[in-house]
Amino acid sequence: MRFNVAQLLKEPVGSTRKYHLAEDIQDLDGEVKLTHLIEGAIRLIHTTEGVLVSGQFYTEVELTCSRCLESFSTAVDFTLEEEFRPTIAISTGAKLPPVDGEDEATLIDSQHIINLLEVIRQDIILALPPRPLCKPDCAGLCSQCGQNLNEGPCTCEQPLGDPRWEALRTLR
Ligand SMILES: [Zn+2]
Ligand SMILES: [Zn+2]
C-alpha cells in the first residue's frame, strides 16, 4: 500500500509506473473486515500537480445481513483514481505550502511515500451495499421467536391470515 515516488517525481511529467497489488489487510480501521487479499493493477503517473494513482481492485468483505443478521462474505470490485500532491519539493527539499481544503489522505509524505490505505478504505466503504443481504431472497428472522427462517420454518402460530395472502401461502 506504500509506494516511494521519489524517483518517479524526478522523471519527466508523464512518466509512469505499473504495479500489481496483492495485499493482505484484514482489518481496515476495525470498521470493515476483509476476508480476501486486496488484488489489482495500479498505475502511477507523474503529473504537473503530483502523482495520479489509478487502479482496479478486487477484494471480499465480511458483512452482516440486514434481514437475518448472519455474517457473510461478499465480493467487492472498486476503482481508485486519486491525485496525490507532494508536501516537499523533490528538487530542493523545501517544504511546500499546504493547499486549502485538501484531503490529508492524498498527500505524498516528506519521505516521498504515497500511502494508499486511507483512500482504499474510503473506496471500499463507498462500494458496499447500504442494506446488505446474504442472498436476494433472504427470508429473515421470525418477528415472534427470532428463528432464522432460512434454516426452516418456526413453530410460531401464523397470525390469522388476511384472505388475500392465503392464496400466496398455499403456493409455498
Ligand atoms: Zn440474510
Ligand atoms: Zn417464530
Image (cartoon, rainbow, N blue to C red):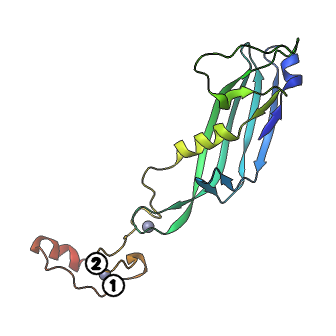
- What amino acid does circle 2 point to? Gln
Extreme-left residue of the structure: 163
Question: How many other residues sit within 10 Å of disc 1, few (<14), some (14-19) or many (≥20)?
Answer: some
Secondary structure under the numbered disc 2 in the rendered image: loop
* Position of 59 relative to 167 (above/below): above
Asked if disc 2 is less than 8 Å from ligand 2, the answer is yes
Residue indicated by mark 2: 144
Q: Nearer the viewer, residue 75 or 90?
A: 90
Return the disc, 1 or 2, that comes first in the chain's sequence. 2
From the top left corner, tell me how far across and down residue 13 is, in percent.
79, 14
Asked if disc 1 is less than 8 Å from ligand 2, the answer is yes
Label disc, if present, on residue 64 of the rendered structure: none
Q: Nearer the viewer, residue 147 or 92?
A: 92
* Position of 90 relative to 58 (above/below): above
- What amino acid does circle 1 point to? Cys
Q: Is residue 2 left or right of residue 82?
A: right
From the top left corner, tell me how far across and down residue 93 is, in percent.
87, 15
Q: Nearer the viewer, residue 12 or 1?
A: 1
From the top left corner, tell me how far across and down residue 99 is, in percent.
64, 16
Question: How many other residues sit within 10 Å of disc 2, few (<14), some (14-19) or many (≥20)?
Answer: few
Figure quarter occupied by ligand 1: bottom left
* Position of 10 relative to 1 (above/below): above
Labelled pair 1, 2 in contact (Cβ < 8 Å): yes
Q: Is residue 61 left or right of residue 20?
A: left
User: Which quarter of the picture shows residue 169?
Assistant: bottom left
Foreground tag (1 vs 2): 2
Q: Residue at x 66, y 60 (%)?
A: 35
* Position of 38 relative to 156 (above/below): above
Check the picture and name the quadrant holding the N terminus. top right
From the top left corner, tell me how far across and down residue 40 is, in percent.
72, 44
Extreme-bottom residue of the structure: 155
